[in-house]
């Protein structure tokens, strides 16, 4: 356990409109109830946090925290590793780390954040890979000390994304929801029950990820599906170029390898990279993927690792292609629980809920109640507990500006 703490009297000063640091317009909220938290975790110096509460005319506050990028690197790696363990035994350690992170990263700004319901987040370095939802709200902000996602709506800001909500888009010639899922099966975690991973239902080895992507049908648009063997690069590009895609759900492996000459890619078959990879170079997606302006993209199989860039390359690439919102995972999650989460998410979006709120509601649902798993014919359904952060903390919503998070 790392002993990180905030300075006894954090270096902070409220800046007037004139003294206010020069910040890009997309980081300045102009509506009440939204605050932007900008973390500068550059190496070799203390982390700096700038808080800007809406509306934009209000003063910002800059805080110096008694922790460095090097300290946080180890802490982020530890909480990611514990989240991926999944068994209930790791939950206590995650809670302790979440409490510590809350005191380090959130508590110094509690006075500015007390009446704020939505956080717009921007961070670099190791914080790019941190599952912020697993941070515990400090007692100065939430007397119950719950997970941050239980008390606030979290939204990451990337100016590569457009300003529109997918639900408000003008009708294209043939607007569709495009669903892409490979045939790779990620077995359920042990807490779900041994009978669920024994291979007794042969169709489930290919259906789970397909079922996850198919939840996009709740949006009410015609769905173009590319599943299993049909999820080839050629068929993906054919569909991407033939339809006006308003919603895109990609349930395939996706990895970021900054040192690789191949760059980031969607991996339709992780064992056949050369034949089944879809590179996400910005210019190719921009020229070939017919996303409607401001559309919603979900990347549920992304594994960001600890490269210090988060899902950034994917968000930038799909933003250049026209996306206005991107939901990205920090690690792939067992397919059955992901299906429950995205079914709730898409139903909320279809009912007019803003995407960031819809994702938070879906995450809170996994936290609050057990999920029912239908094992198939002649088998009793089972309930499983998906409250462990592995199942929900790794998902992020990205929007183009602080106001889009409102």
Image (cartoon, rainbow, N blue to C red):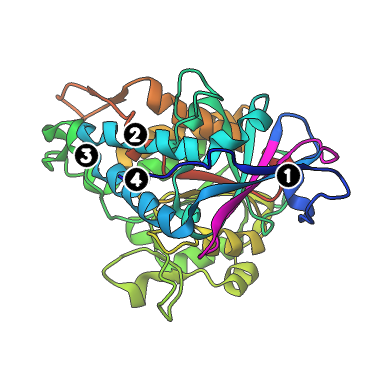
Q: Report which residue position mark 4 lands on.
A: 79
Task: Bin the neighbour count of mark 2 within 10 Å (Cα to Cα): few under 14, some 14-19, many 20 and up.
Answer: some
Comparing labels 3 and 2, the label whose residue is closer to the camera: 2
When the figure is inspected, residue 17 is found, relative to residue 98, above or below; the finding is below
Q: Report which residue position mark 3 lands on.
A: 189
Q: Position of residue 314 (x, y in %)?
A: 53, 61
Q: Are marks 4 and 2 in contact (CB under 8 Å)?
A: no
Disc 4 is placed on an element classified as helix
Q: Nearer the viewer, residue 142 or 318?
A: 142
Q: Nearer the viewer, residue 150 or 99?
A: 99
Report which quarter residue 29 is drawn in.
Answer: top right
Report which quarter residue 371 is drawn in.
Answer: top left
Circle nearer the N terminus (1, 2): 2
Q: Spatial distance from mark 3 to mark 2, Cα to Cα? A: 23 Å
When the figure is inspected, residue 101 is found, relative to residue 371, above or below; the finding is below
Magenta span covers which residues? 35-58
Q: Report which residue position mark 1 lands on.
A: 169
Residue 272 visible here: yes
Residue 26's mark? none
Residue 248 visible here: no
Comparing labels 3 and 1, the label whose residue is closer to the camera: 3
Comparing labels 4 and 2, the label whose residue is closer to the camera: 2
Q: Are marks 4 and 1 in contact (CB under 8 Å)?
A: no
Circle nearer the N terminus (3, 2): 2
- Left or right of residue 235, residue 93 in this image: left
Circle nearer the N terminus (4, 2): 4
Circle nearer the N terminus (4, 1): 4
Residue 96's mark? 2
Residue furthest right in the image: 18
Q: Position of residue 138 (x, y in %)?
A: 50, 28
């Amino acid at each position: 356990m790392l002993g990180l703490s905030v300075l006894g009297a954090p270096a902070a000063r409220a800046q007037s409109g004139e003294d206010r640091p020069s910040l890009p317009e997309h980081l300045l909220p102009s509506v009440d109830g939204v605050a932007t938290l900008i973390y500068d975790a550059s190496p070799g110096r203390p982390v700096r946090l700038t808080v800007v509460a809406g509306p934009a005319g209000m003063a910002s506050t800059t805080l110096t925290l008694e922790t460095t990028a090097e300290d946080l690197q180890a802490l982020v790696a530890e909480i990611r590793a514990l989240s991926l363990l999944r068994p209930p035994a790791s939950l206590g350690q995650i809670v302790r780390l979440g409490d510590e992170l809350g005191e380090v990263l959130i508590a110094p700004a509690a006075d500015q954040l007390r009446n704020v319901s939505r956080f717009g987040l921007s961070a670099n370095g190791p914080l790019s890979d941190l599952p912020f939802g697993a941070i515990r709200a400090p007692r100065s902000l939430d007397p119950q000390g719950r997970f941050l996602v239980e008390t606030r709506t979290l939204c990451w800001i990337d100016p590569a994304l457009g300003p529109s909500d997918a639900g408000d888009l003008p009708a294209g010639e043939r607007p569709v929801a495009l669903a892409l899922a490979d045939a790779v099966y990620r077995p359920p975690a042990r807490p779900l029950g041994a009978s669920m991973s024994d291979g007794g239902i042969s169709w489930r080895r290919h259906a789970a990820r397909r079922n996850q992507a198919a939840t996009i049908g709740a949006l009410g648009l015609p769905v173009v599906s590319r599943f299993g063997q049909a999820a080839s690069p050629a068929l993906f590009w054919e569909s991407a170029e033939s339809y006006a895609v308003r919603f895109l759900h990609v349930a395939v492996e996706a990895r970021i390898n900054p040192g690789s000459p191949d760059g980031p890619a969607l991996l339709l078959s992780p064992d056949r990279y050369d034949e089944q990879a879809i590179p996400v170079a910005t210019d190719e997606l921009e020229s070939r993927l017919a996303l409607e302006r401001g559309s919603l993209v979900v990347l549920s199989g992304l594994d960001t690792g600890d490269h210090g860039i988060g899902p950034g390359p994917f968000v930038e690439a799909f933003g250049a292609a026209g996306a206005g919102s991107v939901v990205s995972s920090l690690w792939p999650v067992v397919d059955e629980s992901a299906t429950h989460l995205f079914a709730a998410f898409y139903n909320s979006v279809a009912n007019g809920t803003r995407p960031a709120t819809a994702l938070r509601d879906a995450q809170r649902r996994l936290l609050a109640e057990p999920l029912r798993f239908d094992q198939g014919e002649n088998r009793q359904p089972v309930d499983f507990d998906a409250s462990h952060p592995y199942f929900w903390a790794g998902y992020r919503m990205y929007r183009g500006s602080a106001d889009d998070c409102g």
